[in-house]
Image (spheres, rainbow, N blue to C red):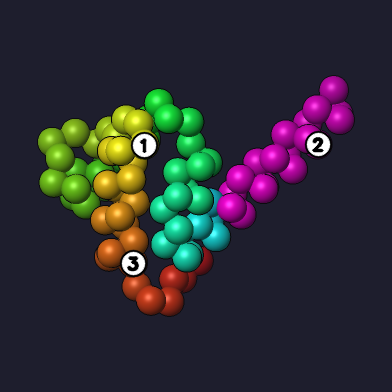
Amino acid sequence: MKENMEHFQREAERIYLEWDQALSNNDISAFLALYTHDATIESPLIPHLTGRDTGICKGHEEIRHLIEKVAAGKPPARKY
């Protein structure tokens, strides 16, 4: 059981670091590779950033559009 938890923690950290790296580099392909093709993202920022009526993006194409908007509006030096 402890080994499973340690594995889960390592994988969660790896995914977080890859997600952050992809966003930092505006690497949309790397970002999307972290999500299944039928993934769903829900955020109150989605309507604000995309002009959509709903705060839900489903699938790679909708997520790609969201991340393109995030990348375009991201300041040159991100703050953590």
Residue under numbered circle 1: 60
User: What residue is rendered at 38% in x and 76% in y?
Assistant: 76
Q: Nearer the viewer, mark 3 or mark 1?
A: 1
From the viewer's side, name the closer residue of 27 and 43: 27
Could you tell which of marks 3 and 1 lies nearer the N-terminus? 1
Q: Is residue 42 above or below residue 75?
A: above
User: What residue is rendered at 72% in x and 34% in y?
Assistant: 8
Residue under numbered circle 2: 6
Total marks shown come to 3
Residue under numbered circle 3: 74
**Residue 42 visible within the image:** no
Does 40 lie within the magenta span? no
Where in the figure is residue 18, as x and y percent of width and height? 59, 53
Q: Quadrant of residue 2?
A: top right
User: What residue is rendered at 81% in x and 36% in y?
Assistant: 6
Neighbour tally class for label 3: few under 14, some 14-19, many 20 plus, Cα within 10 Å: few
Could you tell which of marks 1 and 2 lies nearer the N-terminus? 2
Where in the figure is residue 49, as x and y percent of width and height? 21, 52
Image quadrant where one finds the N terminus: top right
Q: Is residue 71 above or below residue 60?
A: below
Q: Could you tell me how far apart the alpha carbons at marks 3 and 1 are, in whole angstroms? A: 20 Å
Q: Could you tell me how far apart the alpha carbons at marks 1 and 2 are, in whole angstroms? A: 30 Å
From the viewer's side, name the closer residue of 60 and 23: 60
**What amino acid does circle 3 point to?**
Lys
**What amino acid does circle 2 point to?**
Glu
**Residue 3 visible within the image:** yes
Q: Nearer the viewer, mark 2 or mark 3?
A: 3
Where in the figure is residue 13, as x and y percent of width and height? 67, 47
User: What residue is rendered at 74% in x and 43% in y?
Assistant: 10
Position of 44 with respect to 22 (left or right) is left
From the viewer's side, name the closer residue of 16 and 59: 59
Q: Which residues are magenta?
A: 1-18
